Amino acid sequence: MYASRTTQFIVGIFAILGIVALAILSLSLGKISLFPPPGYTLYASFDNISGLKVGDQVQLAGVQVGKVVDIRIKENRALVVLRINDGVKIDDQAIAAIKTSGIIGDKYVSIQLGPGDHDLADGGTIQETQSAFVLEDAIAQLINNSGSSNSSSNGNNGNSNCNCSDTNAAKKPEKSAK
């Protein structure tokens, strides 16, 4: 009726392996690393980071070179803390922009190197930034602009007192009197 010690031991090993596999899966899906690669920290301030979150990628020339490790508010702007891998040099005139991968994809920070002579050190700040493109804001602006231009685009300022029956008369050639 009772399982032997060998059977209990094997079931215990499988249970432990299952728990370890579940923990590894949870950490990888949550984009949490127990041992982050060596690197240094940079800061960048943005007006709008719409959709960027901790754990998102930092890319240079389309290659992942780091991660977003923290986001906070400082002086009414979003301060993004970037962890850059060792061996990657970012100059002092680089531009950090928030981009989207695909149409509805994840956000990431794209770094474009500048002509700077000096590299940023640990704790440095990227001065030039470009905020995220917010599709909803662009659509709202397009709707507002097209709505206000329709009322004055017909050229008659709201006066629709035109004699439209005369428009064909100008196109007909007149008969000459002989």
Image: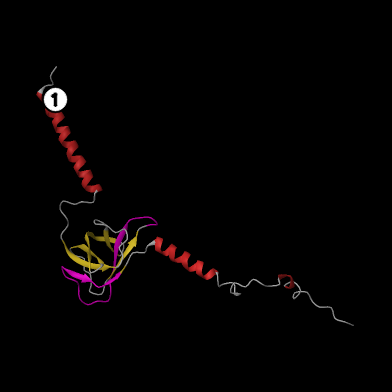
Choose between 172 and 8: the one closer to the eye: 172
Q: Which range is magenta?
A: 102-129
Tell me which corner region of the image, top left, top right, bottom left or bottom right, holds residue 134.
Answer: bottom left
- Residue shown at the point (42%, 64%) measured from the top left: 138
Which image quarter holds the N terminus? top left
- Residue shown at the point (19%, 36%) measured from the top left: 18
Check if residue 98 falls in the magenta segment.
no
- Residue shown at the point (62%, 73%) measured from the top left: 159
Q: Using residue 135 as the reference point, say whether residue 161 is left or right of it.
A: right
Choose between 62 and 176: the one closer to the eye: 176
Amino acid beneath label 1? Thr
The image shows residue 32 at horizontal and vertical percentages of 20, 51
Using the image, determine if residue 38 lies above or below residue 19.
Answer: below
Q: Residue furthest right?
A: 178
The image shows residue 13 at horizontal and vertical percentages of 14, 33
Tell me which corner region of the image, top left, top right, bottom left or bottom right, holds residue 51.
Answer: bottom left
Q: Which residue is mark 1?
A: 7
Q: Using residue 99 as the reference point, say whether residue 163 is left or right of it.
A: right
The image shows residue 82 at horizontal and vertical percentages of 22, 63
Q: Residue furthest bottom?
A: 178
